[in-house]
Image: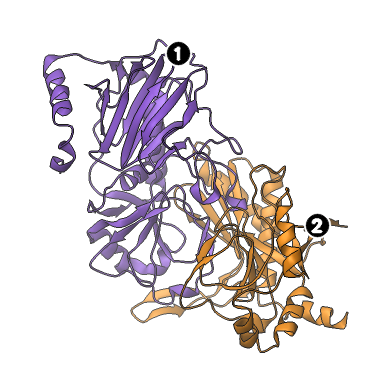
Amino acid sequence: MSALIVQRAGPAVTVQDGGWSGTLASGLSRGGAADVRALTEIWALLGEQSAVLEMAGTGGRFTCDGPLRIALSGAKMAASLDGAALLWGAVHRMEAGQVLDIGAALNGVYGYLGVGGGFDTPHFLGSASTHRASRLGHVVQAGDLLAIGKDSKAKRVGLALRETRQRVGPIRIVATAHTDLFGAEVLERFQAADFTRSNQGNRQGVALECAESFALEGGQSIPSETVIAGDIQVPGQGAPYALLADCQTTGGYPRIAAILPCDLPRVAQAVPGTSLRFTMITRQEGIAAELAEHKARAALGRACAPILRNPSQMNNLLSYQLISGAIAGDEE
Amino acid sequence: MDTAKQANHRPPCELWVCMMQWHSNRDGLEMTQQTAFPNLSYIGVDGVLVRFGATVTEKVNRAALAFHAHVSTADLDGVLESAPSLTAVYLRLDIFGDVERTSQSIEAEMRAQDWFVPKSAAGRIWTIPCCFDGPDLAETAKLVGLSERAAIAEITQTQVRVLTLGFAPGQPYLGNLPERWNFPRLGGITPNVPACALVAAVSQLVIFANDTPTGWRHIGDTQFHDFKVDRPEPFAFRAGDLVQFAVVGRIEIDALAGASDGFGGATCEALT
């Protein structure tokens, strides 16, 4: 059994998988990867569903003590193996002694690193996910030796995800607990408003700043109820707050809408300052969109294609490497 | 014993047909129409919420817990998960199934019996040692209009119930204490109240699962860990459990910190 050795790690590198099911009643939220789409991309690249490293903001420097498959997805980060740039959204081979460097995120918040065989870290009720408030899972630190399970698909390397058109436009929302209480006029304003992902945010949720208020008068008298990732809470004062994977399980703030689960990764990946807009769809449309997304995710594995080594791409990759110290600043 | 009975006395239950329906207009929330409880509404793409009342009362909470217990064991086709809160039950549905049909079967279960009729009191009772010397005890006693001694006695003589678990893994909301304990949370936030602390507000008690900033008043310390990952039952409580606190001194409570099961000297008995 081999291991990934952590030489250096960003402040928020954690082990994650699909999270928990059935623990809401005990006060433990779903948890798991903040960007479930990216998690399924890693799984498609590796050809297995295993625990991965979620890297918020920045990655780290890793070595290994035996040959390894590494898969990269989620927010693009400058990645290199022994100094040679690595294609993001792809699965590569890493040899013992090679140095994997993963830098700052260039177009999002959460990057993911998977390994063939998966990380063999502590599990709780079937999930290896890290939930900091519950001290579950594993927060990766320099000096860690992360055990890796047996890789049954060692030859599945040199593949990349086919470029998929990223969905653009407003984030889709559906009605939830208190949508009716807000009334048609407020819901119209909510969908016409420009929101900005604030500096305040983590795996529990992100604040959405807006010039106008959507507060519900009398909203403080609403009894505390079960809340889930995707819910948009509207406190009496302050910005609406979109709940993410590690949210609390109960909350007493009125909830104006729920973000469609398949659009939630876009909110989780929005860096501070990103503009966001919302559009309400029906529950039936939402279910149809979810089913379509599940189908698309299931097809990701078959859609992986050999990495093309065309010169223009190589040049591009090389340029990334040459200016790696400066690139974070130029990006958007 | 008489005092204990009095402390346990609860006011008559509120109307289960709540006359309130919030309706938003320019003047804020208004009561415009009669809403019958329980009722079912959709939550996001894959959830339904069965509400049993608009305010947290004993009767409403018991009905929610009874319905949760029922759907948890009924194994309804298409229901993936059920979770109770103070006044409602959330159910997560399998969107690969027939969501409309699943919702209809939940609604049928909801209508099948009167969830407000008290069920037999099978369950468990915890006795949890607590040292009542928290920094907010004196002010809390003043708020409830009792001496510190009498305030502590009122808590230890009341069997509180786990109304729901939430906020943090395994963390119980215990209630209800007599009405005079219905004081709001602090306006400011106490930066760090330690795990296992006993805190009070809004006629409820909480044993904190983790160190946490809070507006609840810190009245005592237990050594009871709501959640411990390496225990056969990692989550100590189930909603509906009864809890009684037993007074111990500072030296004793500190000594109980060493209990390897994380229960801090607490005992749990099945009610028959």
Q: Position of residue B88 (x, y in %)?
A: 59, 61
Residue A264 can be seen, yes or no: yes
Q: Is residue A20 left or right of residue B64?
A: left
Instruction: Please tell me in which quadrant of the rendered image residue B230 appears.
Output: top right
Instruction: Please tell me in which quadrant of the rendered image residue B237 appears.
Output: bottom right
3D distance between C-alphas at marks 1 and 2: 50 Å
Question: What type is the residue that disc 2 sits on?
Answer: Thr
Marks 1 and 2: which is nearer the front?
2
Chain letter, colour purple in render:
A
Q: Nearer the viewer, residue A135 or B38?
A: A135
Q: Residue at x 69, y 63 (%)?
A: B222
Residue B130 can be seen, yes or no: no
Q: Position of residue A299 (x, y in %)?
A: 38, 24
Q: Is residue A64 left or right of residue B130?
A: left
Viewport quadrant of the N terminus of chain B: bottom right
Examine the rendered structure and indicate whether residue A111 appears above or below residue B151: above
User: What label does residue A153 carry, if any?
Assistant: 1
